[in-house]
Image (spheres, grey):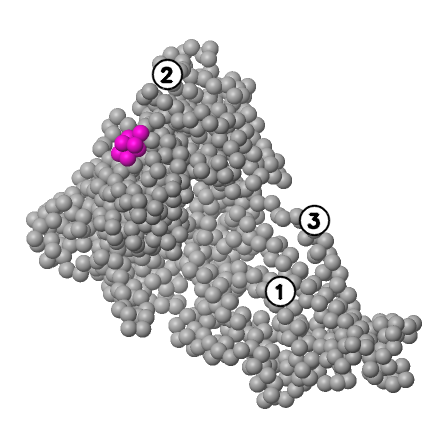
């Protein structure tokens, strides 16, 4: 099957009760990551996208986070797994690429050591064989002189090189799902361009399903096959990449697109105001106060109604089923 | 007379020699010339470690250059000290990238914004407060925020507070050192629009330092591209950035990821990175990454050639 | 992402703070109102009443010279705790001045001060204190001088480090660009950020200073008999450890309680200040 779903979340909710109320970071997220496809998740800082990716891996640091709903990896419910079973899933079936390569690597272990550790944690092979796998993977990310890099320490490599190494380690065990949380935010633009190219090439080769989290619309547009836009923990719009960028439907997506500079002097139209606090979020439209298309019906709209057409879903009062004019526009 | 003139400025960092180890010398800025006219914005583009922030600090007088001069409003800023520098400082302000460390966490908004006012103007406490409220309104913050502390604000709001502090004395030049880089996309646009309207309102000049060539093209009147301590290209009044000619500028432009998937450019998966330590004393800095490198590039540092009105480029391949 | 960290069991912590504050308050009362509270004069020798147990006249009994133990403990508070607080205050004041100058100015001054610190730190604390007392002669004042001379070095280094780390922050650069003088920068920006941590550190260290003073008195280098002091009382009771252990137990408890109280208070203070510092 070509479009096999490898990771699926069903009505995923992540929240943290604290002394001021309930911090709702992820609200009713349904996502499907397909084999060999890249799902882009866009959103601004504090919209819950990092919490979401950490919850998929079971890596939320604070024990008091509550997760509801379902996370299914190849038919296996991850939320019902024990700690030890989850550890086995991480790295082997699900891998992660993080934002800041400098702080991810242990400065006292060589690059080769990191590889061998990760590989031997999951499969029983000798160090020599593990090293061979490591070398192969380092070659795949086109780093010059992989034998030398194996013996080097993290601080001897630049940020861009470390990010490549991290990609190599992540794909070493051929995981089914790769979660890339802002993989190129910490590197320079010219380097970002190359790393993204590398990542795209590799996941297509390995047929890995990828969740690419980023705040940069350019990165998402160039990389993703399908895009989900997140605002205040809700997926407000989800569509195939060309569809989303050509015909954005949700006012927030439109706002994001119009606040990007486009190598012109045309006056930008940013979204005014600030996103609301995630504490005690009601299920009213969280974008209502900043929206310039808000109408009377918006005040009655509840976020659990999903509108739009089959592969272009929008959480906006205007696109709920029944509003034929707007739906026609989408189609 | 131009507002700011940077003449042949070089800044060298020397590491301490450890026992018999070799002393490492890093040339952060090398023979840089820049001019900023009144009421204009110069965009300085470069990647991390290219010396753009060091240059900003030299211009602000926070670092002393090893060579060269910074002339601000006709007065040599580096050589004047104490009293005179205090006078000149009034017209020269800064906004940093890292908004959270740019404000003292123990001070409230009123104290933060009124710092420059207290240093230069002798106002009564009531007038001072009025002035702070006025500034808060200009940068689009709520007047009730005056007693709040930095941790109660979001990034965009903190950056607005820093801008309010910078414009408090109606300076002539503001150095914006990656002022929008750590903000969200939609907030970046808000802040840039604010900066543009302030520029018109108070007739300000900006030195806009950034790694983001798109943002620079939006706000700047003139663009200077910096690579490993040297300015490699300078262009005035560019309407179309495609006119930039230096191989490095072209590479920067090619790296811009546009949000139009149908125009999807081929993402390059090759590897070319240069660590900053590999500086070449003779020859062009860019040869290691340049596709057009010729024999002469290894031997001679390229000098500036004018290719068009107000468009200079330092490359052996172009403009000869 | 705003992840809220909950305080580990605030309730217990609060009780600890109340407990330690009460104890310290009692100490302060003791040292200020000793003549009123104490049942007897601490230096009244009565050989007929020596090594007595608990009685109405002597609530905690008497020592080998027949002096009231409770009264000696109460009078000793002033010397033990008072001296420690004074030593700490002077130490911190000196090291703030030196450390700030050294960290902020840098260059030659910094080098000179730090080499001096290195020299002092090259000797073990205890040995150096003993040497200084040896030169000045025993006595409470000389002990205080010796302890200050030895202790300021560590604090000066810590303060210098903190000043250095704050000096590089953008808000200092921003203040410079706003035209603030060095004096203003130090007092408005650097010290308010450094002081809270130093206060916490000093509170935590107070306990060990009390122990030091008691220790030196125990060695006979601090207070001179017959003046009451906890360490000296421990020393006196040493010979009777088998027959009358209470001679050592009571001053020991006093020292322990004070040290623990100061430590708890320091911990609580740190939590409080860090909480404010988001």
Residue of label 3? C11
Residue of label 2? A330
Instruction: Tell me which residue sits at (63%, 40%) in the image.
Output: A19
Q: Nearer the viewer, mark 2 or mark 1?
A: 1
Residue of label 1? C204
How packed mark 3 is, by other alpha carbons closer than 10 Å (few <14, some 14-19, many 20 or more), is: few
* Secondary structure mainly formed by the magenta segment: helix
Instruction: Tell me which residue sits at (90%, 84%) in the image.
Output: C48
In percent of width and height, residue A18 lies at 61, 39
Say whether disc 1 or disc 3 marks the residue closer to the N-terminus: 3
Parent chain of label 3: C
Report helix, strand or loop for mark 1. helix
Instruction: Tell me which residue sits at (72%, 65%) in the image.
Output: C257
* Cα distance between the residues tagged 1 and 3: 21 Å
In percent of width and height, residue B243 lies at 17, 39
How packed mark 2 is, by other alpha carbons closer than 10 Å (few <14, some 14-19, many 20 or more), is: some
In the image shown, does B224 or B200 lie closer to the viewer?
B224
* Cα distance between the residues tagged 2 and 1: 67 Å
Residue that sits furthest to the right in the current view: C56
In the image shown, does B251 or C125 lie closer to the viewer?
C125
Q: Quadrant of residue C253?
A: bottom right
Q: Which residues are magenta?
A: A200-207
Left or right of residue C8, residue A105 in this image? left
* Cα distance between the residues tagged 3 and 2: 57 Å
Q: Are marks 3 and 2 in contact (CB under 8 Å)?
A: no
Q: Are marks 2 and 1 in contact (CB under 8 Å)?
A: no
Up/down of B299 relative to A329, above or below: below
Parent chain of label 2: A
């Amino acid at each position: 099957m070509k479009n096999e779903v490898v990771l699926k979340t069903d009505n995923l909710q992540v929240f943290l009760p604290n002394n001021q109320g309930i911090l709702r970071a992820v609200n009713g997220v349904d996502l499907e990551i397909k084999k060999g496809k890249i799902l882009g998740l866009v959103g601004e800082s504090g919209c819950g996208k990092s919490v979401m990716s950490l919850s998929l891996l079971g890596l939320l640091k604070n024990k008091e986070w509550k997760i509801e709903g379902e996370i299914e990896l190849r038919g296996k419910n991850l939320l019902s797994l024990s700690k030890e079973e989850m550890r086995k899933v991480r790295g082997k079936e699900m891998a992660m690429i993080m934002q800041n390569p400098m702080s991810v690597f242990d400065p006292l272990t060589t690059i080769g050591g990191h590889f061998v550790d990760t590989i031997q944690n999951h499969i029983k092979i000798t160090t020599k064989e593990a090293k061979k796998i490591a070398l192969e993977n380092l070659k795949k990310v086109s780093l010059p002189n992989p034998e030398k890099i194996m013996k080097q320490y993290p601080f001897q490599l630049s940020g861009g090189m470390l990010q490549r190494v991290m990609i190599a380690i992540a794909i070493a065990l051929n995981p089914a799902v790769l979660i890339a949380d802002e993989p190129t935010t910490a590197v320079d633009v010219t380097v970002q361009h190359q790393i993204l190219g590398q990542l795209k090439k590799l996941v297509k080769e390995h047929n890995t399903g990828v969740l690419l989290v980023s705040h940069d619309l350019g990165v998402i547009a160039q990389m993703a096959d399908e895009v989900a836009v997140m605002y205040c923990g809700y997926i407000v719009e989800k569509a195939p990449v060309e569809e989303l960028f050509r015909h954005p439907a949700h006012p927030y997506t439109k706002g994001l697109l119009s606040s990007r500079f486009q190598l012109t002097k045309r006056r930008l139209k940013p979204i005014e105001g600030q996103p609301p606090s995630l504490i005690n979020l009601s299920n009213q439209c969280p974008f209502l106060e900043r929206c310039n298309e808000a109408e009377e019906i918006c005040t009655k709209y509840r976020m659990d109604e999903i509108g739009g057409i089959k592969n272009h879903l929008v959480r906006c009062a205007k696109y709920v089923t029944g509003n034929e004019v707007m739906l026609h526009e989408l189609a | 007379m131009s507002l700011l003139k940077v003449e042949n400025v070089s800044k060298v960092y020397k590491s301490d020699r450890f026992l018999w180890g070799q002393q490492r010398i890093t040339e952060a800025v090398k023979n840089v010339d820049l001019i900023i006219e009144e009421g204009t914005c110069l965009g300085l583009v470069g990647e991390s470690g290219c010396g753009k922030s060091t240059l900003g600090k030299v211009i602000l007088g926070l670092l002393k250059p090893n060579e060269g001069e910074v002339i601000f409003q006709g007065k040599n800023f580096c050589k004047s000290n104490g009293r005179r520098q205090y006078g000149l400082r009034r017209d020269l302000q800064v906004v940093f990238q890292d908004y959270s460390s740019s404000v003292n966490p123990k001070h409230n908004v009123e104290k933060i914004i009124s710092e420059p006012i207290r240093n230069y103007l002798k106002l009564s406490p009531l007038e001072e407060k009025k002035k702070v409220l006025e500034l808060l309104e200009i940068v689009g913050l709520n007047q009730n925020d005056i007693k709040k502390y930095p941790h109660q604000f979001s990034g965009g709001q903190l950056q607005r507070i820093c801008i309010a502090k910078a414009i408090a004395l109606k300076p002539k030049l503001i150095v914006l050192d990656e002022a929008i880089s750590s903000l969200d996309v939609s907030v970046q646009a808000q802040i840039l629009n604010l900066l543009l309207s302030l520029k018109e309102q108070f007739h300000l000049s900006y030195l806009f330092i950034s790694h983001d060539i798109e943002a620079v093209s939006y706000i700047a009147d003139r663009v200077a591209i910096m690579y490993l301590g040297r300015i490699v290209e300078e262009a005035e009044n560019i309407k179309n950035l495609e006119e930039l000619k230096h191989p490095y500028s072209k590479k920067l432009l090619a790296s811009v990821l546009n949000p139009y998937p149908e125009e999807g450019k081929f993402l390059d998966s090759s590897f070319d990175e240069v660590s900053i330590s590999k500086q070449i004393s003779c020859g062009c800095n860019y040869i290691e990454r340049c596709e057009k490198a010729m024999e002469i590039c290894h031997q001679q540092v390229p000098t500036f050639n004018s290719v068009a009105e107000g468009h200079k480029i330092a490359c052996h391949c172009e403009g000869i | 992402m705003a992840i809220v960290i909950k305080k580990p069991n605030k309730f217990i912590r609060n009780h600890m703070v109340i407990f330690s504050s009460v104890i310290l308050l009692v100490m302060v009362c003791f040292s200020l109102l000793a003549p009123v509270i104490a049942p007897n004069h601490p230096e009244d020798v009565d050989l007929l009443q020596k090594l007595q147990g608990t009685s109405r006249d002597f609530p905690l009994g008497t020592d080998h010279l027949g002096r009231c133990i409770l009264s000696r403990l109460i009078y000793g508070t002033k010397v033990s705790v008072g001296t420690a607080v004074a030593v700490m205050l002077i130490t911190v004041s000196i090291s703030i001045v030196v450390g700030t100058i050294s960290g902020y100015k840098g260059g030659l001054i910094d080098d000179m001060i730090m080499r001096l610190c290195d020299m002092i730190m090259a000797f073990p604390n205890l040995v150096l204190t003993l040497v200084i007392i040896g030169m000045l002669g025993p006595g409470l004042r000389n002990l205080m001088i010796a302890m200050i001379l030895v202790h300021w070095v560590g604090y000066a280094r810590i303060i210098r480090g903190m000043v250095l780390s704050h000096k590089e922050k953008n808000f200092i650069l921003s203040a410079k660009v706003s035209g603030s003088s060095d004096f203003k920068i130090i007092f408005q920006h650097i010290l308010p950020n450094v002081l809270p941590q130093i206060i916490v550190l000093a509170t935590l260290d107070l306990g060990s200073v009390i122990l030091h003073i008691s220790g030196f008195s125990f060695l006979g280098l601090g207070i001179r008999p017959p003046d009451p002091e906890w360490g000296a009382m421990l020393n006196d009771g040493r010979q009777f450890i088998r027959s009358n252990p209470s001679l050592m137990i009571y001053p020991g408890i006093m020292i322990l309680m004070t040290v623990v109280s100061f430590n708890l208070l320091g911990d609580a203070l740190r939590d409080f200040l860090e909480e404010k510092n988001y």
